[in-house]
Image (spheres, grey):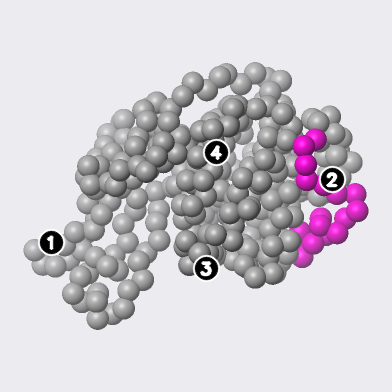
Amino acid sequence: MRVWIVFLLCLAGHAMAAPVSHTAGFIYSLINLFLPLWDTLFTLFPCEPEVGANPVQVEIGEFDEAIEVVEDVVAENPCLNHHCKKGKVCEVDDSNTPMCVCQDPTTCPAADGEFEHVCGTDNKTYDTSCHFFATKCTLEGTKKGHKLHLDYIGPCKYIEPCMDSELNEFPLRMRDWLKNVLVTLYERDEENNLLTEKQKLRVKKIYENEKRLQAGEHSLDLLAHDFQKNYNMYIFPVHWQFGQLDQHPVDGYLTHTELAPLRAPLIPMEHCTTRFFEECDSDSDKYIALEEWAACFGIKEQDIDKDLVV
């Protein structure tokens, strides 16, 4: 997947300005924040997105794109074609062999504004994601480093506890959001190759269904009723999001790092995000299997299909 830095910055900026809301239309509002910016992504970052990738999430795990260079330049500087994960930079040794070393946090560019700040699981605000990953790298091999993850986008702040009743409301909004994201991507897919052909066929059935609940702000009762009445429309969106996150590696399990692109933008605005994903891990093994993920969103066991995540 590509690194959608523009979305990270824009969404974080809105997160800082927006009050915490628990209305049924909140998660849907994320679509309104992002999709108007979609066309500008290709102007600012002209690389083509991977077909079928989810642009409505930020990619902040410990992985990065390799740099493409011409061969004659590589001979002069081996680092130009050497891949290092976030938090590390390439240096050459005495034999001119490239190697990855931890980046000095002081070499990271300063933040342009508060919207670039990120909060770590150590409840410390880092100036930018560069500062965070560089700091995490220096802690490799330590207990503190093992536990340190990027928690959410924006400065650290008080996140109110998630009550049981609120936790039950969270998947109602998430399911509706995922469905609407797919429908919107389908509508805009003519030029951008946002979905694979197989995905388009599946979303087309949802898009053309006259019973589909249109995007908008809806009461929780209506969302719950629609899930029962039009259950089949939600099966693929839930599987699709799992497949978008399960990338490093593709193994049928989601790690904390793989969940980060989805959860990091949501936490400052949806205070039940952390608890929801923690409880999705029903066996507490630090991984969320497809079966656990589907169950969290109310998908029946007989409808779980690994073929739907590819």
Sequence-wise, the earlier of marks 2 and 1 is 1
Q: Which residue is mark 3?
A: 48
Front label number (1 vs 3): 3
Sequence-wise, the earlier of marks 3 and 2 is 3
- The residue stretch that appears in magenta: 201-218
| Alpha carbons under labels 4 and 3: distance apart | 25 Å
Instruction: Pick out the residue farthest to the left.
Output: 94
Sequence-wise, the earlier of marks 1 and 4 is 4
The one nearer the camera, 179 or 20, is: 20
Which disc number belongs to residue 14?
A: 4
Type of residue at label 1? Asp
**Helix, strand or loop for disc 4:** helix
| Alpha carbons under labels 1 and 3: distance apart | 34 Å
Type of residue at label 4? His
Percent from the top left, x then y, of residue 196? 66, 66
Front label number (2 vs 4): 4
